[in-house]
């Protein structure tokens, strides 16, 4: 396979860095996302921008010439668009959105440009929001004392069952349970004792 990296390292590619040859050196350097230029056959790193070094907390010596697949621990291809979880040397976990596409440098040179965006904080915020929503949903549909579903939930389910029954011409039943003499027991023994009875019935 034609290996651009070997030609690049041996000085056969003239005229400056690959980013300069592609006429976007300034953009390459200023991009906030991590950008890698990779050999299209081996996916070895030919160049990376300052944002990549900062994101991965590595030097050019750590990265250049190494397959990016080895660093990320994930298979890549020239058309990949994926979400990748990566751990650094300190075992801190990051989530990256990566997108790779072919990039023509010169008539005879084509590399793969891979852009990695750190979405770790975004994903963490999404998880926290989902957890909060789940808690709020539970609080809004669950009776705190008995931990049974409450009247709000019952109405929602009843409406759903009723609609299904109408759509499919089916019948449904509703069962009511009553605790005999509960008011007398509650008055005689107090509300805490009455609550215990309700919990036992709920179980």
Image (spheres, grey):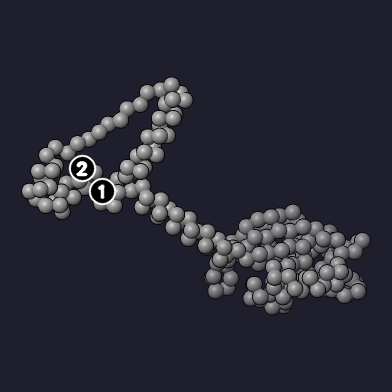
Q: Secondary structure at mark 2?
A: helix
Q: Are marks 2 and 1 in contact (CB under 8 Å)?
A: yes
Q: Tell me where residue 140 appears, x and y as whole percent.
A: 37, 50
In the displayed structure image, the side of residue 119 where residue 181 appears, left or right: left
Bin the neighbour count of mark 2 within 10 Å (Cα to Cα): few under 14, some 14-19, many 20 and up. few
Residue at 12% over, 47% down: 186
In the displayed structure image, the side of residue 82 where residue 36 appears, left or right: right
Residue at 64% over, 72% down: 55
The answer to whether one can see residue 152 in this image is yes
Bin the neighbour count of mark 1 within 10 Å (Cα to Cα): few under 14, some 14-19, many 20 and up. some
Disc number for residue 201: 2
Residue at 36% over, 47% down: 141
* Depth order, front residue of 68/168: 168
Q: Tell me where residue 160 appears, x and y as whole percent.
A: 42, 34
Distance (Cα) linking label 2 and label 1: 9 Å
Q: Which residue is mark 1?
A: 146
Q: Secondary structure at mark 1?
A: loop
Which mark is first along the chain, 1 or 2? 1
């Amino acid at each position: 396979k034609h290996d651009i990296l070997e030609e690049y390292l041996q000085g056969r590619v003239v005229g400056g860095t690959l980013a300069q040859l592609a006429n976007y050196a300034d953009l390459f350097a200023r991009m906030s996302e991590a950008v890698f230029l990779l050999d299209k056959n081996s996916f070895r790193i030919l160049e990376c921008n300052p944002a990549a070094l900062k994101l991965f907390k590595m030097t050019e010596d750590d990265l250049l010439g190494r397959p990016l697949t080895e660093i990320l621990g994930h298979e890549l291809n020239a058309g990949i668009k994926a979400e990748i979880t990566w751990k650094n040397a300190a075992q801190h976990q990051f989530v990256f959105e990566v997108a790779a596409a072919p990039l023509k440098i010169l008539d005879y040179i084509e590399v793969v440009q891979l852009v990695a965006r750190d979405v770790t904080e975004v994903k963490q915020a999404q998880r926290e929001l989902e957890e909060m929503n789940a808690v709020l949903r539970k609080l809004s549909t669950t009776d705190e004392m008995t931990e049974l579903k409450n009247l709000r939930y019952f109405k929602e389910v009843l409406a759903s069952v009723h609609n299904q029954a109408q759509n499919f011409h089916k019948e449904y039943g509703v069962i009511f349970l009553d605790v005999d003499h509960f008011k007398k027991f509650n008055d005689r023994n107090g509300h805490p004792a009455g609550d215990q009875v309700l919990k036992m019935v709920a179980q």
